[in-house]
Image (cartoon, grey):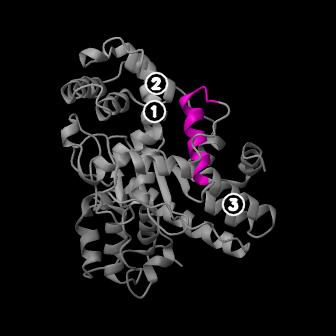
Amino acid sequence: MPASVPAVVRPELLVWAREASGYSIDEAAHKLGFKDGSKLADAEQGRSQLTLAKLRDAARVYKRPLAAFFLPHPPAPEPLARDFRRLTADESVEISPTLRLELRRARRRREIALRLLAESGIEPKPFTLHAEVTEDPEMVASKAREWLEASLTPIPPKTAEAALAGWIERIEARDILVCQVSRIPVRMMRGCSISGDRLPIIILNGADAATARIFTLMHELVHLMIREGGVCGLVAATSTSVENDSGVEGFCNRVAGAILLPGNTLLQDAEGLSRVHEGEAAESEIASIASAHFVSREVVVIRLAELNMVPRSFVNRKLGEYRAAYVSPPSETSRPTGGPPYTVLAIRNNGRRFSQLVLGALERKQISIKDASDYLDVKARHFAEMADRLGL
């Protein structure tokens, strides 16, 4: 069929595909090769039609199958994740097309995983860990640590990356999918969660520091615990003042901090703090505790305040100092070079649990090579290396 043939599609489907992908008329028109948005706007209003070639371009830009444009009516709107943990509260909410795509991919992984498990006769464990924002954060953290069997750590990790991998392994072993995203600025999103009675999802930003991802992992676990707990849309989760850290986000932050740095552990570590009797703690000592437990310095000083070991004024001053350091532009020499191997990133972004499910189904001939490649968004030539890294 010649590419210039008009594509007879419902105009509302063009609007749905563009808006669901997060593009404005002008942005989409530019990506489709139009000089301005007038031709696309005409097609969306039914005043004209795109050519078949342009419709194929639209399918590529919007990351939708071509068949989606021939549906009888637009699908129901896809909900965004319940919570976004972002770097600061000072920036306007931004949901880029890339982030929207990653959220769609995460939901699709869950649907695929549920189907593969059902076809194998396996019922995922229901997620029954529950909390209310009115509960004592210390008690909720204790309940979560018991659920995670966090006290059973025979060999302490040596690096933050190893600690992160260990926490993810514990959470995925309890039938929560954990995946990570690339190409998303940390200022836009540090993490988010998608609730569900079976196979809920936690999404981390792979661009973030390992210690930050550990905290985000726990923060989002608490969001899953509180289910509908008042989270609405995009909510900032950090502040330069502990007084401002209230509501649902503040609760999730406090529980996450207590999971990673329990009170009894911090009290033992803090016995040797040289200036705690003066209501302060030396920066070197704060950094030492943070390094030992793979948490940020912010978590340490906030936990010290929560245990009434330092005043809030000290914490607010330190948080301001740390925030100022974070917003300073990095030097050229501090920027990382290179990166992990492709298959390591593929496993990280898909999640170990999901990757194991797909490759296991392929090995049992439950799915085809084409299916596996589609589900993982990885070419088949990488499967053997991925399976080896996963111990399959």
Q: Are marks 1 and 2 in contact (CB under 8 Å)?
A: yes
Question: Which residue is label 3 attached to?
Answer: 357
Asked whether, in this view, residue 48 is left or right of residue 186, the answer is left
- Against 79, is 96 above or below? above
Q: Amino acid at mark 2?
A: Gln
Camera-side residue of 35 and 320: 320
Q: Is residue 290 above or below residue 65?
A: above
Magenta residues, dominant SS class = helix
Q: Position of residue 35 (x, y in %)?
A: 27, 58
Question: Does residue 345 appear in this view?
Answer: yes
Q: The residue under label 3 is which amino acid type?
A: Leu
Q: Specify few, some or many for label 2: CA neighbours under 10 Å numbering under 14, 14-19, or 20 or more.
A: few
Q: CA distance from mark 2 to mark 3?
A: 42 Å
Instruction: Say which of 15 and 276 sits in front.
Output: 276
Mark number displayed over residue 268? 2
Q: Which residues are magenta?
A: 156-172
Residue type at mark 1: give it: Asn
Q: Nearer the viewer, residue 100 or 70?
A: 100
Q: Mark 2 against mark 3, which lies toward the viewer?
A: 2
> Which class describes the residues within 10 Å of circle 1: few (<14), some (14-19), or many (20+)?
few
